[in-house]
Image (spheres, rainbow, N blue to C red):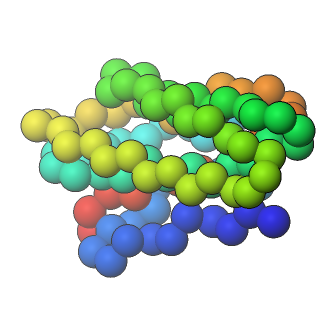
Amino acid sequence: MLSPPEIRPGYRQIASGGPRRGAWDLGPVQLAKGVSWVNVNCVADAGAGRITLVVDTVGEFTVDCPSTEARINVNQLDLAEGRRGRFHIETTDNVQWIASIQVPK
């Protein structure tokens, strides 16, 4: 069973999705100047899976998702200026995931 990413002290969640399987668009996000967090917890049905978290205009992260246990992954963004973009997940239907983006309060 996947649990949602914890919200960091001093931060608020601006986008989240899951638990889901396969690709999904979580919609537009406004990232603030400074540190934001892109989090994903994932697990594959059998073998290994991969998941790519994309914030267009900012970048993407690819994470391996094992079938033996849930993988918890936290990615830090440190932006010189705020940016707007779309947050979406690219993966196959054998990967279950929960994801979120957190920005400073």
Indicate left or right for 81 with 55 as reference. left
Position of residue 55 relative to residue 12, above or below, is above
Residue 96 shows in this picture: no
Identity of the residue drawn at 68% across and 41% down: 65
The location of residue 7, given as percent across then percent down, is: 45, 71
Q: Is residue 5 left or right of residue 51?
A: left
Q: Nearer the viewer, residue 66 or 81?
A: 66
Where in the figure is residue 9, as x and y percent of width and height? 32, 77
Q: How many marks?
A: 0
Residue at far left of view:
80
In the image, residue 24 lies at what x, y percent?
A: 71, 33
Q: Which quadrant holds residue 41?
A: bottom right
Q: Quadrant of the N terminus?
A: bottom right
Instruction: Indicate left or right for 83 with 2 as reference.
Output: left
Which quadrant of the rendered structure holds the C terminus? bottom left
Whether residue 82 is visible here, answered yes or no, is: yes
Instruction: Give x and y (percent) for residue 82.
Output: 21, 39
Q: Is residue 103 above or below residue 4?
A: above
In the image shown, does 37 or 28 lie closer to the viewer?
37
Q: Nearer the viewer, residue 57 or 63?
A: 63
At a point 39% along the width and 46% down the height, the residue shown is 75
Residue at the limit of the structure toward the bottom, as seen here: 9
Q: Residue at x 88, y 38 (%)?
A: 46
> Residue at (45%, 62%) from the top-left corner?
13
